[in-house]
Image: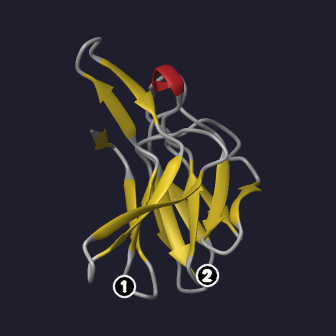
Amino acid sequence: MRFLHAAQTQPDGSVLIVGGEDFDHATEATTPRSDIARFDPTSGRLEAVGNLLAPRSAVRLDGAHGRALLFGGLGARDARVAGAESFGLEDGAKPLAAMPGQRAWHTVTRLADGRILIAGGEDGARSFVPSVLLYE
């Protein structure tokens, strides 16, 4: 069962489903996922389309021009992630400059000028992050 994933509508109406976690009922353990799937609402079909550079859940993303931009999230053992990457159906996952610190449960907003505003969230110590970042 996948949960804590991100979803993004694509220009063709399909939906990318990114990362998330699996829950193992036998051990009650969770494991971050690195796979990306695409759901076609017309056919009702779900297909694998690629992988992230690293497994992560609770990721926040923004998309433009059919690319998903991923910032932070949760890695193994609920570690907060500082990494960032982009994913496109044509060319897969590409690294972006990492954030200056770990962050999960933050917001990601595309501004009118195209820059990305990342605000709030929790850091590696699970404390509130009282700052914002701008990606250009």
Give the residue at mark 2: 114
Name the spot of residue 83 as percent of width and height, x first: 66, 44
Q: Residue at x 57, y 52 (%)?
A: 71
**Residue, disc 1:** 13
**Residue 18 versus residue 62: which sits nearer the camera?**
18
Residue 104 spot, x, y in % from top left: 47, 40
Q: Which mark is residue 81?
A: none
The answer to which image quadrant residue 6 occupies is bottom left
Name the residue type under label 2.
Gly
Query: Disc 2 vs disc 1: Cβ atoms closer than 8 Å?
Result: no
Judging depth in this view, the residue of 76 and 61 nearest the camera is: 76
Q: Residue at x 50, y 68 (%)?
A: 62
At x 27%, y 79%, the residue is 43
Q: Is residue 55 above or below residue 41?
A: above
Q: Quarter of the image containing the N terminus?
A: top left
Number of numbered discs visible in the structure rendering: 2
- Compared to residue 93, the image places residue 9 above or below, namely below
